[in-house]
Structure formats: structure tokens, C-alpha cells
Image: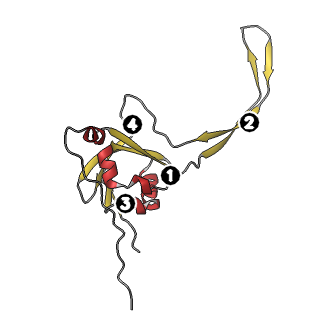
Amino acid sequence: MTQTPTVRAGTPPTPPAINTPEYERWTKESALSFPGGTVTATYGNLIQTLDVNMIGFSCNVSTKNVTVGPSTVTRTIGGASTQRAGYSYVKKQFNKKNSSLAAAGYPIRIRTEIGEYTARLTGSMEDFATFLCSNTAAIYDAIYVYSPRGAEYGPFTQGVI
């Protein structure tokens, strides 16, 4: 006899009343970093799509070995040259969102059971899809993601137990 699987569904938070301090917080732009990029939307849209407390964030940094070769430096034209020795170091890269006055990334659409909203994505759709697949426990309902060219990715859903 096979058992019918039950869906592990959480309940998204209820939006706050308009003109309250919590509502103001929900309307502010927020970014969610993932390995390979960020997705930016209003805080309210993000927390009604994903339970951020369930996401497997970690401080595993990506590292890159950098080697700088030896060089010759001349400080003034026609002056004496000095030799600089080569050296190596390890560069660490933490997840981050670059800040500037320009909108970063490209626009994507995210559709959930509650509705649809526009977000901005830095990084690749593949990295974002991998992030969603790695964090299915944090997804409230089915998520569909549409690229700027209209390609549909998903549904990304919570697993069954």
C-alpha cells in the first residue's frame, strides 16, 4: 500500500495595515543574495515568496588564489628602476549586492499563488534556479520565474514528505 504524500506548506506572513511602520518596511527595496548573484524586490514580496529563516545561508566564502608576478618600477622618467618581488594571496568573496544609483541586474517576473511581481536579478538564471532548488523548504507555494525574454522557469515547489 502506498501512502499519499503530504505537502509541507507553510503560511506566508499577512501583509500589515497600510500607513503603519511595518507597512513602510514592507514597501522598501530589499535584496536576497545567493551564490552567484542577487534578486532584488520589495521586502514584502520577498518574504511572502520565501521563508528567509529556512534558507540555508552560510558563511562559506568562495576563494581565489591570486599571484602577482615580479615587476620593474621607474618612479621618474629617466630615473633609476627598482625591482619588486612577486607575491601571492588568497582573495575571499562573500555574497553581496553592489550598490549604485543605477538599477542593477535585469528585470525578471516572479509569479506565486498570491500574485506576480517584478524583481531585478544579478547573476544568471541558472544560479538563481539552483538556489531555489537548494532551498525548497523555504518556498511557500509554487514559484514561476520569467526571464526578460519571457522564458518560463519552474515551477519551483516545496518537496513532499
Q: Secondary structure at mark 1?
A: loop
Q: Are marks 4 and 3 in contact (CB under 8 Å)?
A: no
Q: Which residue is mark 1?
A: 57
The image shows residue 157 at horizontal and vertical percentages of 36, 65
* Front in this rendered view, residue 17 or 105: 17
Q: Is residue 108 above or below residue 157?
A: above
SS assignment at label 3? loop
Q: Quadrant of the N terminus?
A: bottom left
Horizontally, residue 56 falls left or right of residue 12, namely right
Task: Identify the mark at residue 139; answer none if there is no mark.
Answer: 3
Residue on which the image places disc 2: 88
Q: Nearer the viewer, residue 36 or 115?
A: 115
Mark before the other along the chain sequence, 3 or 2 = 2
At a point 43% along the width and 57% down the height, the residue shown is: 54
- The residues tagged by marks 3 and 2 sit, at their Cα atoms, a distance apart of 42 Å
Mark 2 Cα shell of 10 Å, populated few (<14), some (14-19), many (≥20)? few
Which structural element holds mark 4? loop
Q: Residues within 10 Å of mark 1 (few under 14, many from 20)?
A: few
What distance separates the C-alpha of mark 4 from that of mark 3? 25 Å
Mark 2 secondary-structure assignment:
strand
Q: Amino acid at mark 2?
A: Ser
Q: Answer with the quarter of the image where residue 156 lies.
A: bottom left
Question: Residue at point 50% right, 49% down?
Answer: 35
Three-letter residue code for mark 3: Ile
From mark 4 to mark 2, how far is it between C-alphas?
Answer: 32 Å
| Amino acid bearing label 1 | Phe
Picture quadrant where residue 102 is located: top left
